[in-house]
Amino acid sequence: MKETSQNPRRVRIVADSTCDLSQPLLEQYDIMVLPLHIVLDMESYCDREEITPDEIYAWAEKNKRTPKTAAVGFDRALDGMQRIQQEGCDAIFIGISEEMSTTCNVMRMVAQELSFDRMFVVDSRNLSTGIGLQVLRAAELAAEGLPAEEIVAYIERDREKVRASFVVERLDYLAMGGRCSSVTALLGATLKLKPRIEVHEGKMSVGKKYRGPQDRVILKYVQDMREALLAADPGRVFITHSGCSPQTVAQVKSFLESLAHFERIEVTRAGGVISSHCGPGTLGVLFYES
């Protein structure tokens, strides 16, 4: 694929839990994941380890408010990165957009604490499998033997080519979470709008607005992307959802298969942090443009 430089040091790829990659993918590519936190009143839970999205939804419905979320814990990150340092490996951490979380800054402090000058921190400028796409690409480049500096250059060069969008069923989660200010104005609309949320330069904004049952909205959203999907990098596309019905997910996958364009169509369930901010019934299709 690309010429490699001589570099005897192994490169380990690390992500935070908002990358929303499935366990089989994490294991296949030997990716370390550090959890963000879900905060319910005074209790804090490690994302994807100590609480499920469905438990979060149940708490939110009972308490009539959404959870708070917090960055990767310093001590947990310190322990993970110290192990990589002791293995004699280089490390590349790819994290959630700095517009949405302080996680990348926590990781920089960890590198400073450990005097780990072979640890590189990359702001994905994205969320969910918009991060996951970059993490997997970095892992593939590491497997080819590229040195850390070159991998970081490739990821940062192409990160604005990631196309991340999703449609939400409920606006209250996203509005109360405060990560997308333009959603708040839609809450007072008389029509039950279901906006397409798009990620640009690390921030979320509202795109096209849909109305109707969520399963139909989701299918229309995907069909509206047909031209962009056919022009996408054919290697991989993600369907990532926060608890949609198997039938709806299958419809989306069937549509993507009908395009006969992608080598791999991955289906993943969003973790607790993404679910806390987007709510149930959200689905996104994410890919690299070519």
Image (spheres, grey):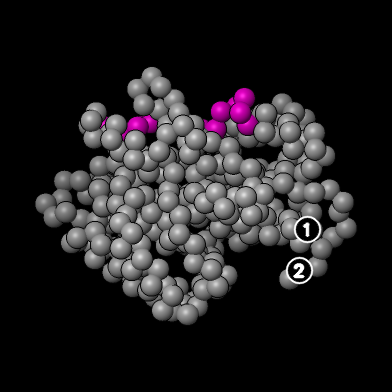
Question: In this view, which residue lies farthest toward the top?
Answer: 42
Q: Which residue is drawn at 33% across and 73% down?
A: 223
Query: Residue 140, how many percent across, how many down?
Result: 68, 60
> Residue 211 is drawn in which quadrant?
bottom left
- Asked whether disc 2 touches disc 1, contact meaning CB atoms under 8 Å apart, the reply is yes
Q: Which residue is drawn at 62% across and 50% down?
A: 27
| Residue 179 in the figure: left or right of residue 105 | left
Region of the chain picked out in magenta, as a range:
65-77
Q: Which residue is drawn at 52% across and 61% down?
A: 162
Query: Residue 171, how many percent across, how many down?
Result: 25, 47
* Structural crowding at the residue carrying mark 1, measured as other residues with C-alpha within 10 Å and reported as few (<14), some (14–19) or many (≥20): many
Query: In the figure, 245 relative to 59: above or below?
Result: below
Quick one: quadrant of the N terminus? Answer: bottom right
Residue named by callout 2: 2
Asked if residue 102 can be seen in this view, the reply is no
Asked if residue 285 can be seen in this view, the reply is yes
| Residue 130 in the figure: left or right of residue 182 | right
Which amino acid, by three-letter code, is at mark 1?
A: Leu
Query: Residue 196, how many percent across, how many down?
Result: 32, 58
Residue named by callout 1: 146
Quick one: quadrant of the C terminus? Answer: bottom right
Q: Does the magenta stretch include residue 269?
A: no
Query: In the figure, 50 relative to 224: above or below?
Result: above
Name the secondary structure under disc 1. loop
